[in-house]
Amino acid sequence: MKRALISVSDKTGIVEFARKLVEQGVEIISTGGTAKKLIDNGVEVIGISDVTGFPECLDGRVKTLHPNIHAGLLAMRSNEEHMKQLEELNVTPIDLVVVNLYPFKQTILKEGVTREEAIENIDIGGPTMLRSAAKNFQDVAVVVDPEDYETVLRELKENNEISYETKFYLCSKVFEHTSHYDTLIANYMRKQRKAEDFPETISMTYEKVQDMRYGENPHQKAAFYKEVGNTKGCLTNAIQLHGKALSFNNINDTNGALELLKEFDEPTVVGCKHANPCGVGSADNIYDAYLKAYKADPVSIFGGIIVANREIDKMTAEEINKIFVEIVVAPSYSKEALEVLTKKKNIRVLTLDNILQKQPSTAYDFKKVSGGLLIQTIDNELLPEDIQVVTKTQPTKEQMEDLKFAWKVVKFAKSNGIAIGKDKMSLGVGPGQVNRIWACKQAISHAIEHLGEDALKGSSLASDAFFPFSDCVEEAAKAGIKCIIQPGGSIRDNESIEACDKYGIAMVFTGMRHFRH
């Protein structure tokens, strides 16, 4: 290895790396700020203009886009004609390229960044050099990640060259790096033009948060990735204060609980099990909200997940510690509460700022299917303005509040889903059934099992989709439920309305459903 080209935005470790290359007899070509940093630290450098015979120009926009650079990168050493042409053109081969790109991601994540600033941080020469070097990887080693400096130096010291296997590994990292970079640019441009349609092709990029011990089951491998951009209020931004690492299922279940929590402004606690709400309570303070959530289903919440939208105090922490829970997430904890919770080894305690912040309605929701991907905008709505009371009996103001509470809960239960609520407390949830009457019976039976028959008297029931028959109304009437909220839209709506009128039940049609599959 005789010649290296170094041009980096992230200068972590670059001086020491370049110095050791020089010690091994490698000649360094460099550009702009990188050249200055190396020279200032005593590393001998050949300026890029001395190689190209052309000055850096246009505020540095043109530096390395020159045949003397790219011929030196792309010439195949085993091709006699290539090497003959290099000699005729007086071009020296380049054996190592060390490049990382303008900080486009860091630029667009800054508050108040302008489009002009973002565009000026789109690297042109860097990706071009990387692609040239990576295409010719058998002859040119190319490094984009400072973490790989040590590997390169070790192999050079031990073998005076970099192995084919390492060069191919470095090459593959280049194309991952440039693909990520280009996707960030494409997605930024798309947002800038405020495109609302779904494009003919779509590229997405995510950054790894952590490897998981396993996936949904121990025989599956898994990792956790995060989106690049504004993810305030998302689980990817949570800080873990205590406990072992989250599992694949922990993350999936906690995310579902957090999305439900975001529907509530008042102090609220959501208990969740297997991505379904099992207990939800709202109150004037977080302690009473927790007691409601726990009381709603003290069996299912065991081993489940608890999320809260207010600081956890000592009294609430002591109640939580009376049972085993996997995870607690809250915006903050009092010092005393944290001392209580961390006494248990196996509980994970997380804090999350902006816990009530929702993603914008333009955000995407993805569902992987074999050989493809389903994409939709996220379900950020709750109720339309023009909900309609379709029965003779009108809900009272208090009953309407119960209906809205139950509607929030059922929105985040798997379909077919039924949720029953009263006095800002879930009484029973029937999620994920293959028919609606089973979900209805399940919600009612859970409420009776944990709270007794009297708890259902005067309660409100929410269904995530319309009633195809009047059977759910019949079951509700037998349980003493007095209000129902559902989308409406069945050809048999009249049967359900007539049944409600028969039993003096108020029914509200939303005209909006919330399937969750």
Image (tube, grey):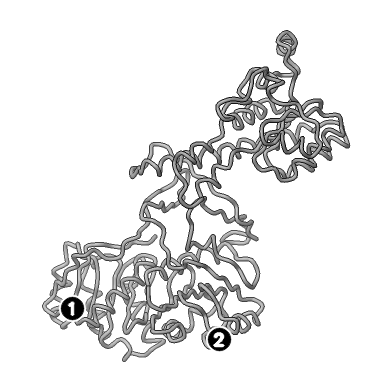
Which of the 4 image quarters holds residue 52? top right
Q: List x then y, in percent, for residue 272.
A: 47, 73
Q: Tell me the quarter of the image containing the N terminus.
A: top right
| Residue depicted at x 54% and y 42% | 104
Which of the 4 image quarters holds residue 438? bottom left
Q: Decide if residue 366 is on the left or right side of residue 131.
A: left
Tag shown at residue 384: none
Label 1, secondary structure: give it: strand
Q: Nearer the viewer, residue 450 or 117?
A: 117
Q: Judge whether residue 213 can be spotted in this image.
A: yes
Q: Amino acid at mark 2?
A: Lys
Pointer 1 residue: 506
Pointer 2 residue: 314
**Earlier-in-chain disc, 1 versus 2:** 2
Residue 215 vs 32, above or below: the answer is: below
Q: Amino acid at mark 1?
A: Ala
Q: List x then y, in percent, for residue 471.
A: 23, 74
Question: In the image, which is nearer the foreground, mark 1 or mark 2?
Answer: 2
Q: Residues within 10 Å of mark 2 (few under 14, many from 20)?
A: some
Residue 331 vs 124, above or below: the answer is: below
